[in-house]
Amino acid sequence: MKKQISVILVNYNGKKYNDACITSILNSTIKERIRIVVVDNASTDGSLEALYEKWGEHEQIHILTLRDNYGFSKANNEGIRYSMEQGIDYYLLLNNDTEIEPDTIEKMFECGRKTGGIIVPKILYADKRNVIWCAGGTFTPVIKKTIQSGLNKTDNGQYDRSGECLFANGCAFLLSRQIVEKTGLLDERFFLYYEDVEYSMRAERNHVGIYYCAEAVVYHKVNGSTGGNEKPANAYYITRNWLLCNRLYMHDEGGIRGKLRFSLFVVYFACNRLAWLFIWFLQGKRAMCTALLKGVRDYRLENWGKMPICISADKTV
């Protein structure tokens, strides 16, 4: 029996994206082997009702509804758990603000079967389909800052060579049951942002390879699922989770070297965040400044998961 592949889509108020994404998946060259699991994070835009109306009776689609917005990690984990219970052995985590080429899943699956690793595709901008958003990735050597290979470069074939990389962008990556059993599920403390960075670092620690599959193409409506980075909540999550992720894989790894690297990172982090505080203050974005400071505070207090305090809209400072 041929292996089944579960495509897991997390929906939070993604009404304008879901249909195009699902349609592109169902146009796959191996569509008979695909099951789609949509995990709804308590959407309020009518997208859940629209999903049930259009896709609720489709034999290849299952909709999981969560009682609250539990974040990207938990929602994907629920989709993986459900898929494992159904006996499915491969899981493609895919943003719902994407569309894929017909052979994308087939190419990723074949690469995963051959390498036994986590597989990431070539990701292009949906509105500029000759421009790369991510073609695999790596980390800077000292502070472990992510680098998306090919970011904002015109696709002239220079990233058409598949191979091993270090970073699996959460927009789209393929896992197997064996990888999940060895590496675990996504860390639900992160809620939003840096869960893919942490998982990539954890994979390396567990000797699980990450491979870029150049033949698999995804088109991403960048920031469609998060609303963009100029939101207070995003400033909060990036600040808090960046600290948590690097602490886990620098300071907590033990030894003088790890602690020194984390100390250097903290210096870089402080300069970066102070610069943004200054910029947002000059722009009158009080809520962005408040969110950043609360991110630091909640990291120190170890308040994880969803941002506990609602931050009001920006007002003039």
Image (cartoon, grey):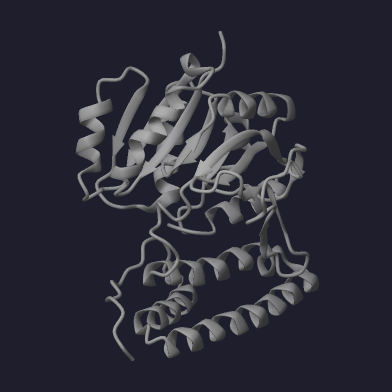
Specify whether 143 is left or right of 65. Answer: right
The relative height of residue 289 versus residue 258 in the rendered view (above or below) is: below
Specify whether 79 is left or right of 249. Answer: left
Specify whether 24 is left or right of 197. Answer: left
Residue shown at the point (44%, 84%) measured from the top left? 280
Relative to the observer, which residue lies in front, 130 or 292?
Answer: 130
Question: Toward which corner of the image does residue 81 lie, by quadrant?
Answer: top left
The relative height of residue 308 versus residue 305 in the rendered view (above or below) is: below
Relative to the observer, which residue lies in front, 30 or 202?
Answer: 30
Quadrant housing the N terminus:
top right
- Could you say where residue 235 lies in the image, as x and y percent from the top left? 44, 71
Residue shown at the point (24%, 39%) measured from the top left? 48
Specify whether 31 is left or right of 164. Answer: left
Relative to the observer, which residue lies in front, 23 or 36?
Answer: 23
- Could you say where residue 39 lies in the image, as x and y percent from the top left? 35, 39
Question: Toward which corner of the image does residue 286 lie, by quadrant?
Answer: bottom left
The relative height of residue 288 versus residue 125 in the rendered view (above or below) is: below
Residue shown at the point (74%, 30%) measured from the top left? 115
Quadrant housing the C terminus:
bottom left
